Amino acid sequence: MPIILWLLSSMIAPAGAADARCTETATSWLQALTASGCPRAQAHVPAASEACAQVDLKGWTRDQRQARKAYLDRCAPSAKGLPGAQIALPDGRRISPCTRFILAARGEEEDAPTPTSTTPGVGLDALAGVIGNALFQCQASEALSECRRTSTVHTPADQINAQIQWCESLQTDQLDAAVSALARMSPGFPIQPEERLAILRGHLDAQRVAAEKVASQAKALEDARAAELQRALLLSRSCMVPLPDMHHPSQAQKASSACQDLLVLWQGYDSTREALHQSGSLAPRVESALEGKVLNAESLQVADPTAVQARPALLETRRVFLVKKVFPEVLQRDGSAAAANFLSEHGKGLDEAWVTEAQDRMLAAEAAGH
């Protein structure tokens, strides 16, 4: 290669080459963690190298450079965590000496807000996230495993609540506030607790809604059973009113309708039952099991089915008798117009000879001015 081209190419360093010490140090840290009881730590070496490749020392202040040097010199992690005693900030967060170096490299004070992203060109914050991720997977491997365990809306609630506790433990500042946040946003972090918690709590919400629906449907069935029995009792009483107690054809008609309604109720198809079906208040499996049946077995005991089935014929005979009995009274008391209305309303099913005679009597009364 011509000497001039060699000189130019040597001036253009590849990305991250200016901080080879960062890569070497991070690699040695992760290897040491692997040897001291964190078997998966060395798997984070590529991510650490990528973080170090982000370091761009151009434009760094003297304080930032000193912070970088101090971090790489003093912050070798162990399986127990980061070196140095944590201190409490006024807002309650805890911070370690190494985090101070990271924040200083970012150009921030120690009381700066917890990081929500890494800073381009700094690299050390990304590296801290990788190291924190490795420590999380070493110190909280059970929590990570339990948090990401597969669950569905059908998983028992106590198991889901246990998973929630595991996931919430990953949100606590196991290292310190800043490094924990950086670790959770590290690309290699196995699970995002916030997202997992949203899913798990969604399962619990769905279970609560389902339980409330089941309770509502059970209450609706209980109420419907009680209401059906009361309805059956009322229909039975109306159907079986003694014939001598009926003095108007409308009473016989009402009793006959009650008998018919009771028979339909016993078949599970009365109008109230249909309205209940349309409302969707009952569980589908209950509706399917009780199709064509009463909701309450006691409803079948309110009257003798044979007597109820025979009752309409007796009531029709009583109705015809009452029409023929009451008609002359209406004609005499209220006149031909009222008698005509009475006959129109109650004369269905009467023999033609009697109807003809009744019409003649109304014409005669009208001619007589009554």
Image (spheres, grey):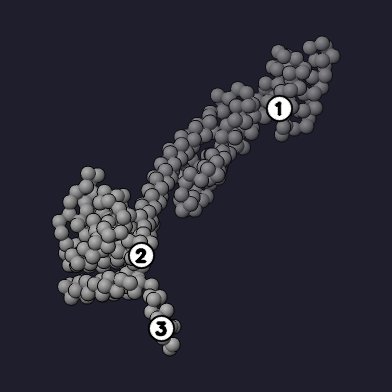
SS under mark 2: loop
Identified by mark 1, the residue type is Glu
Residue at the image position 25 percent from the left and 51 percent from the top:
110
Kind of residue sitting beneath label 3: Trp
Q: Residue at x 41, y 48 (%)?
A: 209
Q: Which kind of residue does numbered mark 2 sit on?
A: Lys
Is there CB contact under 8 Å for labels 3 and 2?
A: no
Numbered mark located on residue 345 in the image? 1
For the view shown, which residue lies furthest in the top direction? 369
Which of the marked residues, 3 or 2, is nearer the chain's N terminus?
Answer: 3
Q: Nearer the viewer, residue 360 or 115?
A: 115
In which quarter of the view is residue 9 placed?
A: bottom left
- Whether the residues at callouts 3 and 1 have beta carbons within 8 Å, the answer is no
Q: For the N terminus, give its image quadrant.
A: bottom left
Distance between mark 3 and mark 1 Cα atoms: 117 Å
Q: Residue furthest front?
A: 4
Left or right of 127, for residue 370: right
Q: Indicate which disc residue 6 carries.
A: 3
Q: Judging from the image, what secondary structure is the residue with disc 1 in? A: helix
Foreground of the two, 201 or 285: 201
Depth check, front residue: 2 or 280:
2
